[in-house]
């Protein structure tokens, strides 16, 4: 196999993605390095650790370990390295890491390479700052030796070591020309890192490195992969999930200009052609007879959700289910409570609708080597799944992570990668790119689970909470996507259940998970469990506040008396929204709070409801967020805003429905998502504190549905407990 | 067939019914124009045909003829169209996938209406989906480029 440039390389001055002899370089900002200069710099360079390479030309190359799906990680993580290295950011080149979990894995994912669950900054922040500080010490040590002065007399300015006493300086690139990496690398502890107030980059709004390319059509996503001799694939999957093919007639496909071959797959039929359009025409011309019989045959959303609701509200745990979390007396005191508030919460399936449809490119070399180019949230999972299915050992599978046109949890899965791998296996060593249609994407997503939740809250005669019981029922995410973790956790499903736990001062609580097994694949949809569990929690908190005739903001502050960060965001958002101010007739405010992913966030929404049509209008959203150290505050604000938009869209209108195992929606016309003319003003305040950075990409989502529901309850007295709150459902509730 | 793309004559040996999008992406290797839905619902594939914003995913290549096709790669010589500069200043893109189409739609708007008000912007842009939710940043960037509301928020520091 010819040598390849294996990583996607991206910086302000250089953007390379290539293979073999193909290399596309787009220069902007400052002049691009020529290929020869780049080669020279690489030949003579210093690599103090696996994250950093300092060229003799002063260019500092920093590895970015996580997938860039819009959250800004390709800037934020290298920025943490640059901070403590004291690098000159204008001379930093960022390179997406290859798949090398030993060097670049995330400890919060057990060392594999995966991006999601708001774990990138939390998993790498300290590690990367330490890596930068360590490399800086290597440079200082080399400079001290060269000048024969004590290292303690040396300081740095961005990209330069100074000996102020003798007024001498040396650029990092100059040091790289002679320095050797010591056998024993300097040990740096977190305590030695720069205080936040002294940071040059962290906490400042540094321009994201990927922005300029993304305004010029130059950013390379998975779908943009082009390789010499590349063929194009499409895959037909059965309408009924997990159905099998009985027979196929591909005569029509063969008649399509550009058709090359059909490839039967374990889960459908693949087509290879010489362009995307031809592959799709050929796929559409296939005549396949399906068995019309699979585990999902009786899966019809409305009926299945009813059975889930029964499972959730049947509190006999012996029948099915596991205890997820229990505090104090659990639910024991609910029996003798003066009053018990009971409610069921329902959530329909939702699709991710990443704007870049699922795609991947693969190429086989012989029968035991595979190279993959994919917009994946996890090159480790892509490798694992490809290895399991093809029996090619993992070390012979090379995954190149491209930019992702949206992720939202969808691209943790590797089904689309497998399409490319299996079609390329039949392509005689040629690379094959498989691009799903939007219809493929909507009909074969790993949906947000359909979930029923039953909550009971016991109150004493003074309306104090004496017991809290929250039971969730639905198809497990982890049982499918991470079976080992699922088993190890004794049948608990961490992402499915997340968000049901809380930090309110409630002593006796019990959370249970009643797993349902109906065979439809569910996955990680932005904020995962938090998208529905917080709907239940925050609605019930509002109901308890109402039982206490307490203001919902004041009541939450009381229940969070020992949690100053939580109190601060709630106070702040109340101030932003002018919470106690009277609203125009027909409008009301609702509040909700989330403690997920080590980030505190409170949101207030202002809504009105058209009682005739049932349509909810959200007029304003305010959010106050404390994510601790905000590496890029403005980026935090736009991430929160983006999650609010995603959450508004999901909780007001998005819904995938199954009938007999087949998805009824297919594209944006019947699965509409929020457009510009539907988005209210969104006001986000990032409250920076010195706490360790929490998760940012998802935190904005959980409070939005309950905030809307709480506002509607204030307006109408009716509780919205079934997501999405579409007009039809709201109209029925208000009737 | 022959097409005029970004003021260059190009040859493409494709069926007349092949959508312009796939001619651009697969045949001509111009990947800046994106596939999002295939049914003119999301706007990711927007190009200009004789200056008119057009969904290339539903435009048969054979229907284009001698008309001038402009893609994101041809919006400006050096990526310095006022909208592109404003997009950078406002830090608009997140995943960025929809932004080629957003920019092409916005560019057509400003050509027709150099000083659009907020409502005109929203009306013109609501055919373009951004799943990351950058809508407010897009509005600000268009207002910045049109001189409408440039002082609303400072530029992102370089």
Image: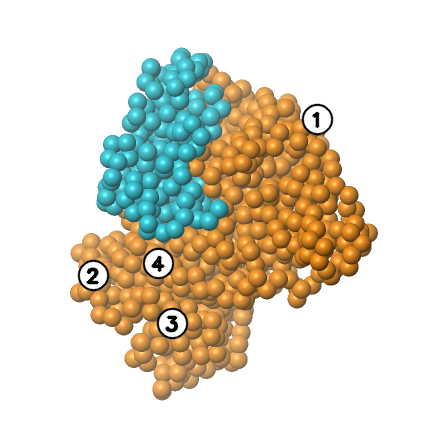
Chain colours: A orange, B cyan
**Chain holding disc 4:** A
Q: Secondary structure at mark 1?
A: loop
Looking at the image, residue A7 sits to the left or right of residue B154; the answer is right
Badge 3: how crowded within 10 Å, few (<14), some, or many (20+)? some
Residue at which label 1 appears: A1
**Quadrant of the image occupied by residue B108:** top left
Residue A411 horizontal/vertical position (percent): 52, 44
Extreme-front residue of the structure: A166
Chain-order first, disc 3 or disc 1: 1
Chain-order first, disc 2 or disc 3: 3
Badge 1: how crowded within 10 Å, few (<14), some, or many (20+)? few
Extreme-right residue of the structure: A183
User: In the image, what residue occupies the spot 59% across and 37% down?
Assistant: A9
Can residue A478 be seen in this snapshot? no
User: In the image, what residue occupies the spot 51% across and 34% down?
Assistant: A28
User: Same chain, marks 1 and 2?
Assistant: yes
Q: Secondary structure at mark 3?
A: helix
Looking at the image, residue B21 sits to the left or right of residue A77; the answer is left
Chain-order first, disc 4 or disc 3: 3
- Distance from Cα at disc 4 to Cα at disc 2: 33 Å
In the picture, the quarter occupied by the C terminus of chain A is bottom left
């Amino acid at each position: 196999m010819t040598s390849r440039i294996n990583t996607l390389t991206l910086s302000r001055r250089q953007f390379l993605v290539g293979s073999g002899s193909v290399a596309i370089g787009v220069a902007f900002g400052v002049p691009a390095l020529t290929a020869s200069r780049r080669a020279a710099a690489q030949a003579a360079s210093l690599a103090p650790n696996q994250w950093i390479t300092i060229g003799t030309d002063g260019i500092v190359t920093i590895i970015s370990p996580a997938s860039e799906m819009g959250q800004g990680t390709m800037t934020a993580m290298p920025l943490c390295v640059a901070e403590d290295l004291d690098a000159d950011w204008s001379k930093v080149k960022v390179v997406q890491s290859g798949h090398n979990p030993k060097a670049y894995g995330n400890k919060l994912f057990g060392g594999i390479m995966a991006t999601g669950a708001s774990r990138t900054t939390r998993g790498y922040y300290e590690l990367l700052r330490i890596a930068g500080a360590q490399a800086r010490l290597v440079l200082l040590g080399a400079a001290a030796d060269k000048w024969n002065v004590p290292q303690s007399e040396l300081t740095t300015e961005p990209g330069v070591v100074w000996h102020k006493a003798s007024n001498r300086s040396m650029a990092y690139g100059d040091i790289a020309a002679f320095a050797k990496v010591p056998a024993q690398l300097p040990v740096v502890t977190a305590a030695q890192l720069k205080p936040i107030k002294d940071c040059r980059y962290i906490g400042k709004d540094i321009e994201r490195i990927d922005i300029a390319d993304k305004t010029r059509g130059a950013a390379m996503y998975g779908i943009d992969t082009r390789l010499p001799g590349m063929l194009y694939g499409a895959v037909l999957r059965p309408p009924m999930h997990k159905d099998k093919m009985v027979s196929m007639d591909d005569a029509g496909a063969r008649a399509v200009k550009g058709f090359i071959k059909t490839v039967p797959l374990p889960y459908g039929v693949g087509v290879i052609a010489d362009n995307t359009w031809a592959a799709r025409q050929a796929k559409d011309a296939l005549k396949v007879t399906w068995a019309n019989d699979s585990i999902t045959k009786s899966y019809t959303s409305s009926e299945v959700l009813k059975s889930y609701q029964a499972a959730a509200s049947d509190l006999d745990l012996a029948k099915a289910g596991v205890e997820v979390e229990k505090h104090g007396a659990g639910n024991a005191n609910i029996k003798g409570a003066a009053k018990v508030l009971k409610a069921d919460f329902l959530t329909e399936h939702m699709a991710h609708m990443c704007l870049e449809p699922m795609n991947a490119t693969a190429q086989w070399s012989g029968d035991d080597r595979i190279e993959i180019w994919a917009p994946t949230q996890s090159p480790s999972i892509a490798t694992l799944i490809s290895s399991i299915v093809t029996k090619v050992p993992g070390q012979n599978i090379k995954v190149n992570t491209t930019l992702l046109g949206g992720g939202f949890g969808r691209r943790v899965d590797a089904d689309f990668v497998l399409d490319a791998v299996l079609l390329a296996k039949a392509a005689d060593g040629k690379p094959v790119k498989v691009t799903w249609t939007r219809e493929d994407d909507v009909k074969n997503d790993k949906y947000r689970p359909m979930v029923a939740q039953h909550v009971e809250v016991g109150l004493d005669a003074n309306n104090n909470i004496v017991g809290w019981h929250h039971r969730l029922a639905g198809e497990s995410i982890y049982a499918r996507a991470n079976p080992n973790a699922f088993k190890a956790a004794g049948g608990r499903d961490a992402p499915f259940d997340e968000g049901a736990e809380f930090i309110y001062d409630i002593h006796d609580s019990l959370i249970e998970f009643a797993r349902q097994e109906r065979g439809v694949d569910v996955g990680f949809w932005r904020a995962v469990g938090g998208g529905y569990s917080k709907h239940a929690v925050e609605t019930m908190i509002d109901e308890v506040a109402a039982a206490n005739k307490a203001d919902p903001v004041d009541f939450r502050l009381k229940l969070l008396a020992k949690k100053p960060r939580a109190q601060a965001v709630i106070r702040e958002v109340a101030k932003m929204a002018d919470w106690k101010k009277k609203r125009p007739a027909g409008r009301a405010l609702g509040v909700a709070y989330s403690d997920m992913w080590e980030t505190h966030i409170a949101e207030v929404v202002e809504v009105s409801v058209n009682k005739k049509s049932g349509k909810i209008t959200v007029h304003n959203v305010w959010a106050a967020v404390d994510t601790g150290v905000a590496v890029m505050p403005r980026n935090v604000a736009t991430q929160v805003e983006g999650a609010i938009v995603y959450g508004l869209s999901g909780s007001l209108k998005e819904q995938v429905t199954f009938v007999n195992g087949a998805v009824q929606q297919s594209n944006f016309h019947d699965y509409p998502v929020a457009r510009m003319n539907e988005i209210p003003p969104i006001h986000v305040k990032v409250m920076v504190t010195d706490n360790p950075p929490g998760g940012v990409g998802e935190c904005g989502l959980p409070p939005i549905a309950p905030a809307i529901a709480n506002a509607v309850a204030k307006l109408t007295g009716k509780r919205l407990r079934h997501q999405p709150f579409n007009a039809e459902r709201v109209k029925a509730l208000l009737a | 067939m022959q097409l005029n793309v970004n003021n260059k004559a190009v040859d493409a040996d494709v069926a007349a019914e092949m959508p312009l999008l796939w001619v651009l992406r697969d045949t001509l290797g111009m990947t800046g124009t994106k596939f999002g839905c295939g049914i003119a619902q999301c706007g990711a594939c927007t190009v200009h045909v004789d200056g008119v914003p057009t969904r290339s995913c539903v435009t048969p290549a054979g229907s284009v003829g001698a008309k001038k096709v402009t893609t994101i790669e041809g919006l400006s010589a050096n990526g310095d169209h006022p909208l592109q500069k404003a997009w950078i200043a406002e830090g608009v893109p997140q995943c960025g996938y929809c932004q080629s189409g957003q920019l092409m739609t916005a560019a057509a708007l400003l050509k027709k209406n150099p000083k659009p008000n907020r409502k005109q912007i929203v009306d013109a842009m609501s055919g373009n989906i951004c799943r990351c939710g950058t809508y407010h940043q897009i509005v600000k960037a268009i207002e910045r480029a049109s001189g409408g509301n440039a002082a609303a928020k400072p530029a992102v520091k370089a």
